[in-house]
Image (spheres, grey):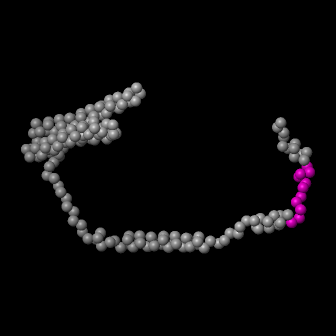
Amino acid sequence: MAQDLRNLFEKDEKAQNVKMSEGHEARFLQKLEEELPKQKSSNRFNFFNIAASVVVLLGLTVGAIKFFNPSVESLEPKEVVEVKSDIKSMGEVVPDLKKVEDYYLASINLELSKVQLTPENKELVDGYIERLKELNEEYDKLTVELNENGPNEETLDALIDNLKFRLNLVIRLKEKLQEFNEDSFEQIIS
């Protein structure tokens, strides 16, 4: 079934010697010109080019004016009100405990960032978040007490315990969410 193409062309030498009649190419081009529509020079296209150039130039002009002539508002001095709280954190009052405070706060924030809130577990998470808010308010009260009375062992221990409770609470929340997800998965399979 498969034939060698070279053999086919060698046998059919007549097809290779065929010449076209004189003027064939000219007649073909003339018919092609008649059949194809002539391209009109589009004035619309030129109009859009000019309009786009004008828009670009206007944009550059406005940008240059704003850049080189700053507005009057930016030259007027603005009044900056800085409210500084007199309450210092545990790490500011006792520099030795700064690392401890930073460690617990960073750990709490890291663990909270890993919690995935879904409509199914929203109620559970909201309960834990409410308890965290209570512990945070208690921490703020202890910080005020630390600032008023100065550093003492009881207040510092209470602050550190508060941080520990918050971290443990977030870890328990993650564990409960994991159990909740496993239970939900088992219910789906069943």
Q: Nearer the viewer, residue 30 or 137?
A: 30
In-image side of 161 versus 52 (left or right): left
Whether residue 97 is visible here, answered yes or no, is no
| Magenta span: chief secondary structure | loop
Q: Residue at x 90, y 54 (%)?
A: 17
Q: Nearer the viewer, residue 96 or 183?
A: 183
Residue 179 belongs to the span the image colors magenta: no
Image spot of residue 93 (x, y percent): 15, 45
In-image side of 5 versus 177 (left or right): right
Residue 188 is drawn in which quadrant? top left
Q: Which residue is most to the top?
A: 190
Q: Residue at x 37, y 71 (%)?
A: 66
> Against 8, is 56 above or below?
below
Whether residue 91 is visible here, answered yes or no, is yes
Image spot of residue 102 (x, y percent): 24, 42
Magenta highlight range: 13-23
Residue 16 belongs to the span the image colors magenta: yes
